[in-house]
Image: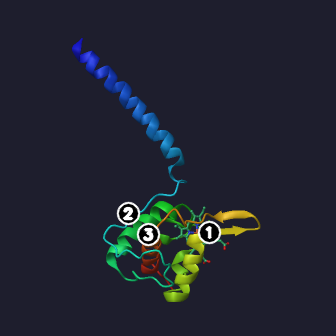
Amino acid sequence: MILNRVIAPAVVAGLALCVGVASVGAHGDVAPQPVDTTGLEQLGEQWRSKNPYVGNETAIKIGSSGYNQNCARCHGLDVISGGLAPDLRYLEKGEVGDEWFMERIRRGATINGVTKMPGFEGVLSQEAMWAIRAFIESKHDG
Ligand code: HEC
């Protein structure tokens, strides 16, 4: 009897947990995911025009998880596009690419009134954005 009293609430709690997780999962790939940038030089309020973390191993690692959580569903896992959105392996390297990258990641892309890509300004920190850029550039092709 004592055992039952202990187990039954645990089972109920377990079920509730499953339902909770399932309903979060249904939306989980759409909600922007925060990116923990601990370990990176903090950049302050001023927007940089070029990537302060280019080639930085810590940034590439943080950017890899930031990318896979926020960008991969459209741009493809590991920056290999399945055709839904441009293949970012071909985004120009260096400052020209940096500028276009920042324009898109901050403001997104709305074409003929249709939001093709959401803007991430106010969602991701500048540090997280440049870390994602460092990761994308590390996968550059061509
Ligand atoms: C909902 C789908 C979607 C998500 C999520 C998304 N993008 Fe995009 N992105 C697009 C589409 C579609 C375009 C092409 C827009 C156009 O036609 O100019 C694009 C364009 C871009 C471009 C310009 C590429 C070029 O060659 O002109 C960059 C850079 C970019 N996205 C980066 C990102 C990053 C970084 C993330 C994650 C933080 C991200 N995107 C998340 C759909 C998405």
Label at residue 2: none
Q: In the rendered image of this protein, does residue 94 appear above or below residue 29? A: below
Which quarter of the rendering shows the N terminus? top left
Badge 1 marks a residue whose secondary structure is loop
Name the residue that disc number 2 marks: 36
Task: Judge left or right: residue 58 versus residue 91.
Answer: left
Residue placed furthest toward the front: 45
**Label 2 crowd (10 A; few <14 / some 14-19 / many >=20):** some
Q: CA distance from mark 1 to mark 2?
A: 21 Å
Is mark 1 in CB contact (under 8 Å) with mark 3? no
The CA span between labels 1 and 3 is: 16 Å
Residue placed under numbered mark 1 in the picture: 108
Residue 5 in the figure: left or right of residue 37: left
Left or right: 95, with 110 as reference point? left
Q: How many marks?
A: 3
Query: Answer yes or no: do the residues labelled 1 and 2 have beta carbons within 8 Å?
Result: no
Disc 2 marks a residue whose amino acid type is Asp
Q: Amino acid at mark 3?
A: Ala
Counting from the top left corner in percent of width and height, residue 49 is at: 51, 84
Instruction: Give residue 135's quadrant in the image.
Output: bottom left
- Tell me: is circle 1 under 8 Å from ligand 1: yes
